[in-house]
Amino acid sequence: MQPLLKQLARPLASSGGQFLCRSAVSSFQRTLPLSRTISRLRVPSESELPESTRQLISKHHGDNWARAFAVNPDTIRRFVTYYEDIFGTKTRLPLQERELLAVVTSAANGCGFCQANHTLGLAAASNDKLRAKRIALDHHLVDLTERERALADLAEKLTLTPRKIGQEDFDRLRKVGLSDEDILEAVETVSWFNHSNRITIALGVVPDARYFE
């Protein structure tokens, strides 16, 4: 998961790894060696990294999460491979719904980095910055559609109390138009963001300044 196609090149969650601007590459090259405060682990300098890892970081705008994960090139490779697939074009759920799941999951986990990042993605996909910010703060206070509400509630429940997920949750999703294949993708998306949130929280990755511009 600005015109919308150009906007999707900005936030990580909306790029799907498909867009790369020269300014992002040059920014990465300028900032990578300078800061070790964006993670609890060592942040490697550009010169330490294999070319394939440098390309992955540049492809994702030199963002802090990529620089932090690069301490283990295999970690960032595995992470990006799954991320680009789940936020690519060959998915069942619309980008806006995948961003909704990302934001609600990250908010439930208290993952400030992913919450800030994917709020931008949701704003771009929905073309509504204010609504995206309201959802990130508390989706219960937002006038969601029935389908959005069912998806958001699934994300929160699967994140906080996964053993309470029952048949009634899936029946509710079917009633608002999701097929079994769609439901599985929703569950997969929420589960992946729980994975992503926990890595980012554990490392203490600092959100990039551009997430708040």
Image: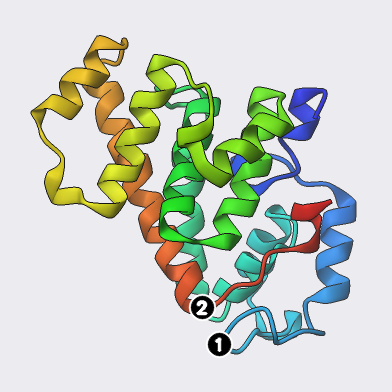
Q: Position of residue 50 (x, y in %)?
A: 63, 76
Compared to residue 123, the image places residue 136 above or below, namely: below
Corner quadrant of residue 199: bottom left
Front-lying residue, 174 or 61:
174
Specify which label sits upstream in the sequence, 2 or 1: 1
Q: Residue at x 65, y 79 (%)?
A: 49
Residue 51 appears in the figure: yes
- Please give the residue where the numbered disc 2 appears in the rendered image: 203
Q: CA distance from mark 2 to mark 1?
A: 7 Å
Residue 17 appears in the figure: no
Q: Position of residue 87 (x, y in %)?
A: 51, 38
- Which amino acid is tagged 2? Leu
Q: Quadrant of the N terminus?
A: top right
Please indicate whether residue 130 sits to the left or right of residue 163 in the image.
Answer: right
CA neighbours of label 1 inside 10 A, class few (<14), some (14 to 19), many (20+)? some
The mark total stands at 2
Secondary-structure class at tag 1: loop
Q: Residue at x 65, y 30 (%)?
A: 131
- Which amino acid is tagged 1? Leu
Compared to residue 9, the image places residue 115 above or below, namely: below
- Please give the residue where the numbered disc 1 appears in the rendered image: 41
Q: Are marks 2 and 1 in contact (CB under 8 Å)?
A: yes
Front-lying residue, 47 or 151:
151
Please indicate whether residue 31 sits to the left or right of residue 186 in the image.
Answer: right
Please indicate whether residue 118 sits to the left or right of residue 48 in the image.
Answer: left
Q: Residue at x 82, y 59 (%)?
A: 25
Please indicate whether residue 135 sits to the left or right of residue 27 in the image.
Answer: left
